[in-house]
Amino acid sequence: MPTLHQRILEINAEKSMQYTTDESARNRYWASHPTFFACIKCMDGRVNFPVMTKTPVGIVKPFRAIGGKFEAWWPSFLGRVRHWVEKAESMGCRSFIFVTYHYSASDAHLGCAGWKYDTKAARAHAEKLQQELSYIFGEQMTAIVAGVETDHDLLTLHGPHADLSGEMLAGKSEAEVYQTIASIFPDMNQQTNHDLAPFLLGNAGRVEELTRQPRDLKQKGHNERIIAVGQGFDWLVEENLALIINDADPNLADSIRVAGSLIEKNLKDAPPGDDATIFTSIPYRNPGLDYRQAVVRSQGLRLFAERVLQESFPDLMKSGRLHSLAAVMWEANKKIEII
Ligand SMILES: [Zn+2]
């Protein structure tokens, strides 16, 4: 087995264990905060929502793509958001989605590579997506644009007339916290307001930590080795190892080609023994049909990615340094199974 495949399995085993032990924390959390939360974000490993808001892993449903570039018209993306919103509705809950973009206060080139460091364009895209999602889901879902400043992990929500950051809530009483949120988001219902507060208060704590003990801004170099295609790669994100392509992307071949060119470049600069891999994964919830459709989709995605890369990067494919791996992931514990 290639070393990189071994490494993927090791990272997954560790993260899956952590996810399983966090189960009771998540259940306790949901019992008192019924609103469903999701976050649209860049695949950049620095955008790490649980760390940034000091909340248990798995509370917020992630949607990750290069630069967070989802479009509301993408049929499978919209279908997934709709399924999630309708599940909340069937349980008598509302939904909330953070539509994020990211930037760095100290250095433009520590911003979002997916947007070629153009923060204005990234924010404009988030605003358009937020408006379309709000239009589609109406009062059932609150969508809010949020900036993530990655030097200090500062989360800033953009309201219709003013901004709200966790810092603004630090030291306030519970009643004052709810009041402040309501003053920036006057249309937000009370339950959503209450369930949003812990993320902002957690973020205030995180920002304070990083202000006291600043982060080493010498970034882990972006030296990805994995073209990850499919869904449910959150356990892999922190490692800065994977270029993640959500299979809801209707321009899947284009995105795979972009990732292929980056991997080719990374391998050129790497020691001769280093390798890279295509890695496809599809989550499933139940054995039976749900499992079997995940198997077929993951295998199909792998063949598709191989074909696209063969056409555009024949030398890379011939070099023997790019492998491929197809997996399915059991949603309950995030554990992958190689197929
Ligand atoms: Zn980014």
Image (cartoon, helix red, strand yellow):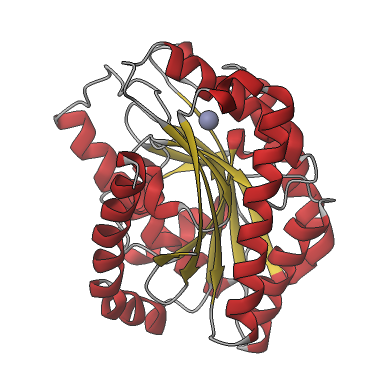
Question: Residue placed at 43% from the left, 39% from the top?
Answer: 47
Q: Nearer the viewer, residue 135 or 197?
A: 135
Q: Is residue 112 visible?
A: no
Question: Residue placed at 60% from the left, 69% from the top?
Answer: 295
User: x%, y% of residue 157?
Assistant: 54, 43
User: x%, y% of residue 260?
Assistant: 60, 27
User: x%, y% of residue 183?
Assistant: 56, 53
56 is higher (above) or lower (below) than 215: below
150 is higher (above) or lower (below) than 230: above
Using residue 249 as the reference point, say whether residue 109 is left or right of it: left
Question: Residue placed at 27% from the left, 80% from the top?
Answer: 24
Marks counted in the figure total 0
Can you tell which quarter of the image residue 173 is in?
bottom left
User: x%, y% of residue 124?
Assistant: 72, 30
106 is higher (above) or lower (below) than 55: above
Residue furthest toward the left? 213
Can you tell which quarter of the image residue 283 is in?
bottom right
Question: Residue placed at 61% from the left, 39% from the top?
Answer: 68
Using residue 105 as the reference point, say whether residue 301 is left or right of it: right
Using residue 164 as the reference point, say whether residue 237 is left or right of it: left
Q: Is residue 208 visible?
A: yes
Can you tell which quarter of the image residue 58 is in?
bottom left
Using residue 189 as the reference point, say whether residue 271 is left or right of it: left
